[in-house]
Image (cartoon, rainbow, N blue to C red):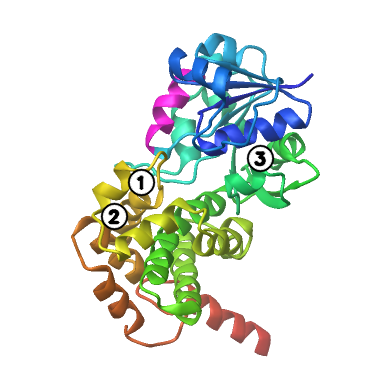
Amino acid sequence: MQKVTIIGTTSWGITLGILLANKGLDVRLWARTEREASKLRKKGDPVRFPDITLPPQITITSHMDEAIDDVSAVILAVPSATMRQNISRVASHLTKSTLVISAAKGLEIGSNKRMSEVIAEEINPRFCSNICALSGPQLAREVMRNLPAAAVIASEDISTARKAQQLLTTPNFCVFTNADIIGVELAGALKNILALGAGIADGLGYGDNAKAAFMTRGLTEITALGMTLGANPLTFSGLAGLGDVIATCTSPLSRNHYVGTELAKGRPLAEITEAMTEVAEGINTTLVAQNLAQQLGLEMPIAEKIHQVLYEGADPRQAATELMGGNVKHELSGRRWRLFSLFRRGRRSSKS
């Protein structure tokens, strides 16, 4: 029986564990403390998943040696802020055949790095071809209920992506492959900024027309950043981009959308996050995106406004008003954006 380790007892970590256990795999779920592990063994997770019983194929442990012994894959379902700490714990246990799958959708504050870059810095360089990233519209509670969903697994080594695809795919969880790990990771992280804004729009009662416009403009903006950092723009039209934007900007199950709606009610950010049991990745990602935009001289008005709301005390209603009433120009043009030049090259090619 194939063995898989899940690092992290987040909602998504537990969901992936159940998904793979129900597929017939031997799953080890690693918890940070023995107290947490013991609680999960006895009661499951009654707060987040009150109606779910963990299957017997899941072994819950706080001992890393036990968790990662003789496994074919390690899935890191941890917040981006703790990815480096967690992969450093795992690194010495990896072998040349161990798949290393990031299931986190965030960017590291300070370094501005993607999760696969963080992982690559902490593991043996000989194992870096085993790194891949899982993304897409993956609302944990829906996947937990075995509702149909699709995802994308990306790796610079497409054979690695195919191995992970085979491991993760189930009848109701369809996993596609992609070689553009830069785009898949950036799309998965940056879309959380848009979910915050969509939550604000819903909280202000702006309606579906305004939200659709915001989502579309936001997708164009994050695509421009992705292209500047080496991503394929088509990736942002796929599951990791458009697919995840739709899910997280429209669903009440989205943590980032929830934060946005609460901000629109006038609640302070600290009060909102203190009451949450899990991380809304868009909060940190907004800070990283703002830093990247400034470094690159790139125009990112949506990220800038969300940053002002989160970190500068700006009023959400005023920020939304300014965004909707911004300067109008060609929808593919922005400072240092490559999208408009790509569009023009395409037109020239079609005429020749």
Q: Is residue 162 above or below residue 255?
A: above
Residue at horizontal 43 percent and vertical 32 percent from the top: 83
Q: Which residue is mark 3?
A: 157
Nearest-to-viewer mark from 3 and 1: 1
Q: Earlier in the sequence, mark 2 or mark 3?
A: 3
Q: Main secondary structure of the magenta part?
A: helix
Decide which of 92, 46 is in the foreground and name it.
Answer: 46
Decide which of 229, 163 is in the foreground and name it.
Answer: 163
SS at mark 2 in the image: helix
SS at mark 1 in the image: loop
Compared across the picture, whether 15 is left or right of 325 comes to right
- Crowding near the residue tagged with mark 3, few <14, some 14–19, many ≥20 C-alpha atoms within 10 Å: some
User: Splitting the image into 4 quarters, where does residue 318 fall?
Assistant: bottom left
Place of residue 44 in the rendered image (x, y in percent of width and height, measured from the top left): 57, 26
Q: Which residue is mark 2?
A: 291
Q: Is residue 115 above or below residue 264?
A: above
Q: Is residue 178 visible?
A: no
User: Splitting the image into 4 quarters, where does residue 170 fall?
Assistant: top right
Looking at the figure, which quarter contains the C terminus?
bottom right
SS at mark 3 in the image: loop
Q: Amino acid at mark 3?
A: Asp
Place of residue 228 in the rendered image (x, y in percent of width and height, measured from the top left): 44, 61
Q: Do the CB atoms of the residues marked 2 and 3 lie less than 8 Å apart?
A: no
Compared across the picture, whether 157 is left or right of 286 comes to right
Looking at the figure, which quarter contains the N terminus?
top right
Q: Amino acid at mark 2?
A: Asn
Q: Amino acid at mark 1?
A: Asn
- Crowding near the residue tagged with mark 2, few <14, some 14–19, many ≥20 C-alpha atoms within 10 Å: some
Q: Which residue is mark 1?
A: 112
Residue 87 magenta: yes
Residue at horizontal 42 percent and vertical 79 percent from the top: 333
Bounds of the magenta segment: 81-90
